[in-house]
Amino acid sequence: MTQHATDANVLRASKLDCAALSDALDRLSIVGQCHKIRPCDPNFRMAGRAYTVLYEAVQDQPGTVGEFIDDVPPGSVIVIDNQGKDDVGTWGNILTEAAHRRGMAGTVIDGNNRDVALCRSLGYPIYSRNTWMRTGKGRIQLKALQVAVNIGGVTVNPGDIVVGDPDGVVVLPQAQEDAILSAAEQITLQENQLREAIRSGMRMDKARAQFHYHDLQSPGYTGTRP
């Protein structure tokens, strides 16, 4: 059983688009949109709690990469900070297969991954800055696990909810996740009602005014359920 099957807020997050969650983050003045982190396949979607990994350049006595995978709780999103370096990969097909078999929700990398074909064929979600085949073995090493990391300009702490869809990745800090989810659910409701009004023949300007479209993401806006 994956983690989001028993985690109510992860389940709520999995039903929401990143666009609505992004608007909710803006409303609450929280930076949670991971800049330039994109899916390796446009059909990927994921939601789970962050298990964080920090890499560094190899030191005098090289360490290893990837050997944390057996200790990651199923349902987690593995969040890897390679400081945006684009000259090596941090993830490949062996890790993809292991993570998929262990029931991880997905992987997010501030850096590159390789062996993209396997994640696509398995349907295992990976989000990264880019893809390139050059290995990180002998070039980077594990520095720390379960510490605060940076992904696309966003601080991610262990246990934060991480959501990915075709638009990219957003992070919901644990302390604010209830407020973010409630705001995103409200935004989704009002936008769906706006769409229905337009489908029924209402002018867009009138529909947007009725459902407060221009205010939905505004800081401090509380809104009402029409």
Image (tube, grey):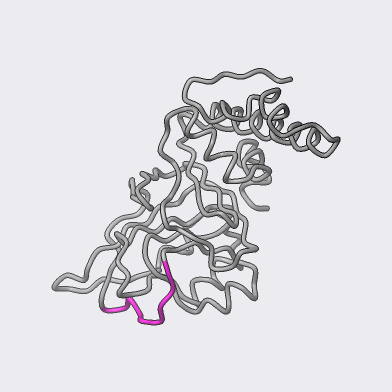
Furthest toward the right, the residue is 200
In the depicted view, which residue is nearer to us: 16 or 207? 207
Q: In this view, does 150 lie above or below 127?
A: above
Residue range highlighted in magenta: 130-138
Q: How many labels does the image show?
A: 0
In the depicted view, which residue is nearer to us: 19 or 105? 19
Q: Where is residue 207 in the image (x, y as percent from the top left)?
A: 72, 29
In the depicted view, which residue is nearer to us: 150 or 27? 27
Q: Where is residue 94 in the image (x, y as percent from the top left)?
A: 50, 77
Q: Where is residue 193 in the image (x, y as percent from the top left)?
A: 76, 31
Q: In which quarter of the image is residue 63?
A: bottom left
Left or right, residue 70 beside residue 110: right
Residue 11 is a magenta residue: no
Q: Is residue 141 above or below residue 110?
A: below
Furthest toward the left, the residue is 60
Q: Position of residue 170 (x, y in %)?
A: 50, 46
Q: Is residue 35 above or below residue 129?
A: above
Residue at (55, 59) in percent of width and height: 106
Query: Predominant secondary structure in magenta?
Result: loop
Q: In this view, does 159 lie above or below 100?
A: above
Q: Quadrant of the C terminus?
A: top right
Residue at (49, 71) in percent of width and height: 95
Left or right, residue 124 beside residue 62: right
